[in-house]
Structures are given as structure tokens and as C-alpha cells.
Image (cartoon, rainbow, N blue to C red):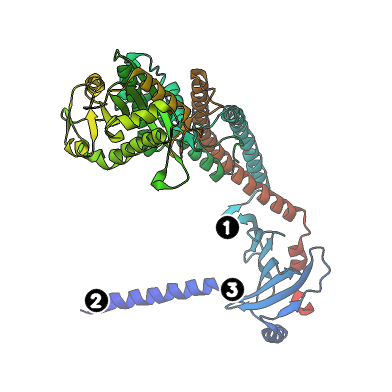
Amino acid sequence: MDITIITLTVGFVTYCFFRSIKAKSRVKKVELSDTDKEELNKLEKIAGKQLPYRFPNKRGLAFQIIEFVRPGYIKRRIFDRNGHCLFLIKYNLDRTIAEFIEFGVTDGHYFRKTIWNEKDEKNEFYQNNKQQIADFSQIKNELQYYRSMVQEKRAEVLPVENDMKQYANELENHAYYQKEWVKRDKITDTEAIHSLEKVEKLDFDKKRDLRRGLKARNALRIGAINSGFKTYNKKVENFQKRMSDLHLGKIKYLHTMDVLSDHDLRHASNLLAGAAAEELVNKRIKEVQFGKVLIHNLILPYPYEKQTKLSNNQIDHLVIASSGIFCFETKARISKNNSYDMLKDYGEIADQVAKHKESIKYVLEKSNNPLIINLLKRIPSIDQLIRNVVVVVSRSEEKFSLEKTERYQRVGIEVCQLDDIQSLLVKAPEGIGLQPEEISAIGEEMTNNKALEEEKTFSENILLFEDEMNLDEKAVDEQLYHANQVIKRIDHIDNLLADYLSGAREWRKLYQQYHYWKKFYDQVNNFANAENYYEQHQIDKNILDRI
């Protein structure tokens, strides 16, 4: 027990002894005279106040602030007229300088620091934040090193930048020759189908092309070109955004193309299939070997809603034969499981073919031709003379059946397929039998009354590569060539841009280091050439008396 108490006592005494020595070492013991004490009392009254700085100087020094840093220091800060602190001096109580800091003129982060020890030996170094450099030549060497590194890296980056500019010029040249892929003004079915046939390279005089035009996938080339321009647009949009984000500017002629939507593609496919189906029906009617008049794509005046103003009604095929007047409406449809449900289209078709009969009746009833006048008197009913026929052509299978046609039959609409056309034309209703001269007279009357207005236009129709209708395969291929060249050069620039940005980032980092050392060098060089204010302060012990 006694040993424990003795051990603890010795340890405590030792701790107190070393602590007192450490505390004494931290504070420089200063013996002050009565005059010194009087001066310190005066300083206490002005501590923290802004006082004029009256020493003659070339640095624009204007005012100073004095503070006490207890224990043992007086801190003095000297400012220029802009409020920048240029000097910070720490004095011991005997007014010897303990520390002298000279800041840069424009940046207080760079400064030269001088510290005196108790033997009045000074340690001088340059400092930025926590970095200390004792030798001015070291700063100069760092500056020269980073200058050479920046020049070397810049020499690597410049050729890549020049390559990018070259590809950008080529990119702009190809984009300049791009024409619009889609024209969306109101155009006729005929114009739209003409452009579709051209792009798909179809010739409806060939049976093989007719069958291909009917297929569900009949617009493969149109879809492929459209897909190519979608890729083109995506590339262009991303490229322009990237150029904008990188502040590299936009290319003048680089613009996106108007492309077809999914609805547009379906509509184009249906137009193409409808044209192919009409041509098949046209060929089949011509194969029927007896006297007849065939008019394809006939547009007749029609008094819509019994108004006085006439409008137009378009009939796919009008056949005038001894068995009557036939209005053929052609529909290309995709059958399923060897059949097609006709009720799906009833509302659209029934309204359409009803107008066919009304327009023909309108033309015949207002005719002044004696043959036609006598014909209308001779036959039991004009409605029996005119027959509405819907021909359904399959886009998917050659042989199929038509389901649920009874509703059409109840309103006098006959529904058939290609193979049924000949039997329809030779079978006449009872009491109807047109003579050759009557057939010719009706045909002439229909031709004379063909609407003078142009074919009706539809806003949803599309015209591809419109150029005054001078569309050919070469024009299509030129468009694709320029689009592919734009994509190719964008990819080249993207690849170059990755290398350029990598090199530019490294170059920027080196430049920042160079800029850091250049600024540091300029500041330190300024310090080295400045007057040695601290020597004046060190010599003049009564500096505080002049405040």
C-alpha cells in the first residue's frame, strides 16, 4: 500500500515539473521597463482600430490595425488603399520581430514568410497554402517544366483538333446536298403511289411485282430507307447536342430529316397494295372476251346530300356491258385462317358504293342522248341496270373465303373475288340487255361527264423525294449516299472527339499546373525585387512610437 502511494506521488510530481517547463518554453520571457509598460498601455487604447499608415512607400500602403495576441505578441497588419493586407508583422513584447509575412499584391494566397528564433536567426521561405519552398530557383524550375509539358501536350492535341475540323467540313458538305425525304402537302393518291412504286422499284406490268405489291411486307425498301434516316436523325441530334454542350458550335447545314411515322408506313403499305389490287382487277376484266367498255379510275359529279353544288365521286372500275353497268370497288385485305370477315368493313364500303350508283344515275338522268333516254324508258328500273360490286383481293393468301356477306346482299351489293369477275359480267338480271350502240352511248356519256376538277387530295398521303416528280432510282441512291456519309463522318468525329477530350483534359490539367506556377513565380519574383521592409522594421526598434 505504501509503495503504491509513493509511486503515484513521484509520477504526479514528475508530470507537474515537465508541464511547467513546457509552458515556460512556449512563452518568451520578457523583462519590460517602465517606459515599455507605458507604451503598451497606450497601445491597448488603440488596439483593433483602423489607423493611418504614414511611412513613405511605393506600395500604396494606407492604413494599419494593431492587435494584442496574448500571451507575448503584438500583431500588426498593414493594408493598401483597396483594403488588401500586404504585410503582417508579429512583435515580441520587447518589440523585436518574431514573424514577418509579405503577401502578394494581387493574391493573398502567395506570400513570403520570415520567422526569427530567439537568437535572431531568420528562416525565410515562400509559401502557398501548406506548401513551403525555400529556394526561388525551385519555383523557376517548376515553371519551366510545366511550360514545356504544356507545349508538348498541346502539340499532340492540335492535330486531332485539325482532323475534327476537316471531318466537320466534309459533314457539312454532304448535309448541304440532302433533300427532304418526305413531302407532306396535300397530294393525290396517284402521285403518292407513283413515288412509292419508284422507291420500291415495282413495275405493275409484271405479275411478279404485282404479287409483291400486294404482300403485307410490300414496303420493305421504304421501311429500310426510313429506318436509315431515323438513324441519321438520331446521330445528328446527339451530335448537335454534344457540340453545343462542349461549346464547339453547330454545323450550318446539318439538319434532321422528316421521317415517316408507323401510321405513315402502314398508310404507304395500304396505298401500294390497293394500287396493285386495282391493277389485278383491271387485268382480269380485260380478259373477259366480249363487247364492253372499261373505264379505270373514273371521277363523276355527285350531288352530295342533295345540294345544288356538285362534288366528285371516284369509281375504281366502271364496266359497261350487255349485262349492265358495273361499278367495281376494289379492296386489298389481309385474310386470316383462309377467310375474311366482311362485316368489319361494312359501314365504310356500303356508304362508298352507294355514292357510285347515285353519281351514275345523276349522269344518265340528265343526259340528252336519245339512245339513253329511250333506254331509261325501256328498262323496268335504273337501279336494276346499275350493279355495285366489291372485289376483295387477299394480301396474304391466294385462296380464301369471304364470311358474313349477307348484309351486303340485302342492300344490293355483290361481293366477290378475282375469280368471280367473269361470271358476274356475263350474268344479267331479267329484263336487262344492253345493245352495242347503247353500251357505246353510255360509255361516251360517262367520259364526257368525267369531272373537270383534279383528283381529290388527301392530307395523309405522302410523296417521297419530291423533285417536280422527276423521281428515279439515282435520286434515291444519292440521298442514301449523302445520309450514310454524314453518319460515317459523325462516327469519325465522335471517335476523334473521345481522343481529343482525353488529351484536352490532360492538357488542361497541365495548363492549370503551369498557370499555378506562373502566378506563383510572378508573385515571388515581385517579392524578391521589392524593398526589404522587414530590414527597416528590424533596425528601427521605435517603430511603434511613430503610430
Of the residues under marks 3 and 2, which one precedes in the sequence? 2
| Residue 344 numbered mark, or none | none
Rendered location of residue 483, percent (x, y): 50, 27
Q: Are marks 1 and 3 in contact (CB under 8 Å)?
A: no
Please, what is the three-letter code of the amino acid marked with disc 3?
A: Lys
Q: What residue is shown at x 48% (from left), y 18% (from top)?
A: 473
Rendered location of residue 10, percent (x, y): 33, 75
Please, what is the three-letter code of the amino acid marked with disc 2?
A: Thr
| Residue 4 numbered mark, or none | 2
Q: Nearer the viewer, mark 1 or mark 2?
A: 1
- Residue 297 in the figure: left or right of residue 152: left
Q: Residues within 10 Å of mark 1 (few under 14, many from 20)?
A: few
Q: Nearer the viewer, mark 1 or mark 3?
A: 1
| Residue 28 numbered mark, or none | 3
Q: Nearer the viewer, residue 314 or 238?
A: 314
- Residue 159 in the figure: left or right of residue 437: right
Of the residues under marks 1 and 2, which one precedes in the sequence? 2
Residue 43, compared with residue 410, is above or below; it is: below
Please, what is the three-letter code of the amino acid marked with disc 1?
A: Asn
Spatial CA distance of label 1 from label 2 is 51 Å
User: Which of the 4 image quadrants contains residue 267?
Assistant: top left
Q: Secondary structure at mark 3?
A: loop
Spatial CA distance of label 1 from label 3 is 27 Å
Q: Are marks 1 and 2 in contact (CB under 8 Å)?
A: no
Q: Residues within 10 Å of mark 2 (few under 14, many from 20)?
A: few
Residue 280, compared with residue 334, is above or below; it is: above
Q: Pick the quarter of the image with the N terminus.
A: bottom left
User: Which of the 4 image quadrants contains residue 506?
Assistant: top right
